[in-house]
Amino acid sequence: MTQATYDRQRVGVFSLISEEHVQMLMEYLNFDQLDARQMSIKVAHAKTCRWFLNTSGYKNWLDAGEIADHNGLLWIKGKPGAGKSTLMKFLTAHSRKTMRNAVVVSFFFNARGEELEKSTTVTYRSLLVQLFEQLPKLKCVLGHLKVPEGTITSTFHWSVALLEVLLKHAIQNLGDTSIVCFIDALEECEEDQIRAMISFFERVGSHCTMVGRDFSSCFASRHYPPIYAEKAIELVLEGHEGHEQDIASYLNTQLKIGKTKRAEQIRSRVLEKASGVFM
């Protein structure tokens, strides 16, 4: 057996866990469709979405001096078809490119996918896998499972409570590393599960704010069901000038009708009927 081990003393578990056992746990933690929904979302149309980076809400979310007001939570809301998922994919990619000292993780709920893809169980599994892949040293928290080596099988049950414990310990052991988490399409998961997940993120965010750890999360959802966080920056897409300009830009590329006066009238009419939604 390979002698490589993970020291778990940092997380309060004073024993050793073999590399083979960690690898097996990782294999069962992973899931084939973890990023299926995100991969299916189209990349933002040229020059769209960038307006969001200049909104006061987004800037306040990034401002460490304001974190006590929102505990690192930004919540984007909008109508069905308003482009929330495209925006979230853009923000995830932008954060990975610009926040070089941060670990960026994401999950996109998928109501049209397998049952697991619309549950918070797979949300937590996905976030953990991404954290472990980017910071392998965090795999030490798997010692909290207390599963004897050689006993784990593919039928191992990853409960929400257990996954929350692992995620909480992983975040607590990030040290000076920042973490940014994007979760899209909350409405595509069962409401009770989402409420419980939001409560968990609020507790983690509050604790991180209190101890000075940099933890930020960004959610996106429709307006209904009406779910709220106690502390959060809420930004509604409809009515923002930048969002309306994005729709106009999109229409201009889709409507191949020339630049006559009649064509401009048609574009204006379609934009008005769009009512904040990409058609």
Image (cartoon, grey):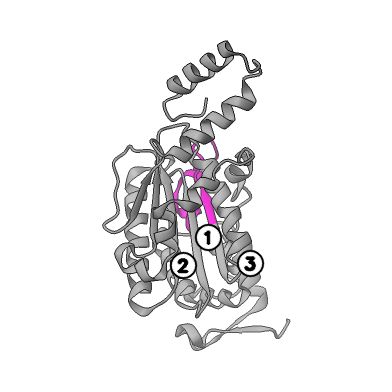
| Mark closest to the chain's N terminus, 1 or 3 | 1
| Mark closest to the chain's N terminus, 1 or 2 | 1
Q: Quadrant of the N terminus?
A: bottom right
Q: Is residue 238 visible to us here?
A: yes
Query: What crowding class fits label 3: few (fewer than 14 Cα within 10 Å), some (14-19), or many (20 or more)?
Result: few
Give me the residue at 39% from left, 38% from top: 222
Q: How far separated are the C-alphas under marks 1 and 3?
A: 10 Å
| Mark closest to the chain's N terminus, 3 or 2 | 3
Specify the label residue 127 is tagged with: 1
Q: How far separated are the C-alphas under marks 1 and 2?
A: 8 Å
The spot of residue 22 in percent (x, y) is 62, 73
| CB-based contact (under 8 Å), mark 1 and mark 2 | yes
Q: Is residue 152 visible to us here?
A: no
What span is colored magenta in the figure?
Answer: 106-125
Q: Quadrant of residue 152?
A: bottom right
Amino acid, disc 3: Glu
Specify the label residue 167 is tagged with: 2
Specify the label residue 133 is tagged with: 3
Give me the residue at 43% from left, 46% from top: 220
